Amino acid sequence: MKIGLIIIGDEILSGKREDRHLARFIELLSARGLSLSWAQYLGDEREHIAAQLRLAFASGDLVVCCGGIGATPDDHTRQAAAAALDRELVLHPEARELIWQRILQMAAEQGSSAEPDHPDTLRRLEMGVFPAGAEIVPNPYNKIPGFSVGSVYFVPGFPVMAHPMMEWVLDRHAALHRPVGVIERSLIVQGAMEASLTPLMERIEADFAGIKVFSLPSVDHPRWGRHIELGVKGEAAQLDAAYAALKAGVLQFGAVISTEMVR
């Protein structure tokens, strides 16, 4: 199962707010021996969000979608998810109870009373209107839940809420977790061009199932100058042998290895 992240909000694309989800999600994945397969940034355009969510639902990937699940005019994610699934939007009974409990808590803190039919109450309950058949994603920060359909999970855009909800999602899929250990080894290569090393990279991937080879060239590094960081990543059982074959191939080519790195 691949893992994807969708981040929604004009404020991210315009630069008004800096995204804090991508780096944190990668950290949470790494702590569980997992890695991110893909990520998208989307603006607040309902039709475009719906189109991308159709692909996410059809992919079978584990996807976390951040942002746009509120009840203001610039929030489109709940409606886009319903459109992508061709389902109606309904008030989730558990979400309704959680939101009502939050309303009561806020009223008590303010020394006021909560009215079930007050316009503000009805607007807040809109945050519990999800595509029919959705399940709850608990929000430990303020009880206002997210939701999920299949393996696609929807959480708020606020990092203080979204990040613990991301953890809940990943821990719900504990069967995907892998032992945390060395998953990447690389070396700094000087005196060779990527094109010349490409056959070696292709051979490593062909000989070692589950291993990916990566190449990161640089032309002005303050320490190594022009060089290529060449490495392998993947399952620990194959990693050492794949790395040994890569290193041997570089030396056989006649290039210089300046240093070796383990991550």
Image (spheres, rainbow, N blue to C red):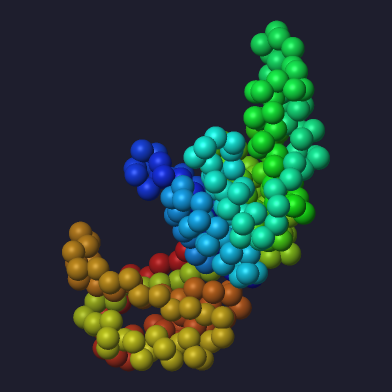
Residue 42, x across and y down, in percent = 45, 53
Q: Identify the residue at image location x=58%, y=74%.
A: 236
Residue 234, x across and y down, in percent = 54, 74
Q: Is residue 49 visible?
A: yes
Q: Identify the residue at image location x=60%, y=49%.
A: 79
Q: Is residue 105 visible?
A: no
- On the rendered structure, is 151 left or right of 93? left
Pick whichever, 113 or 18, lies toward us: 113
Position of 254 relative to 187 (above/below) = below
- On the rendered structure, is 49 left or right of 222? right
Q: Identify the residue at image location x=74%, y=12%.
A: 113
Pick whichever, 259 or 8, lies toward us: 8
Position of 241 relative to 65 (above/below) = below
- On the rendered structure, is 84 left or right of 16? right
Pick whichever, 141 or 198, lies toward us: 141
Residue 170, x across and y down, in percent = 66, 55
Residue 240, x across and y down, in percent = 52, 79
Instruction: Say how many tags the image has.
Output: 0
Position of 79 relative to 110 (above/below) = below
Q: Quadrant of residue 94?
A: top right
What quarter of the picture does the N terminus occupy?
bottom right
Q: Quadrant of residue 254?
A: bottom left
Position of 15 relative to 214 (above/below) = above
Pick whichever, 4 or 185, lies toward us: 4
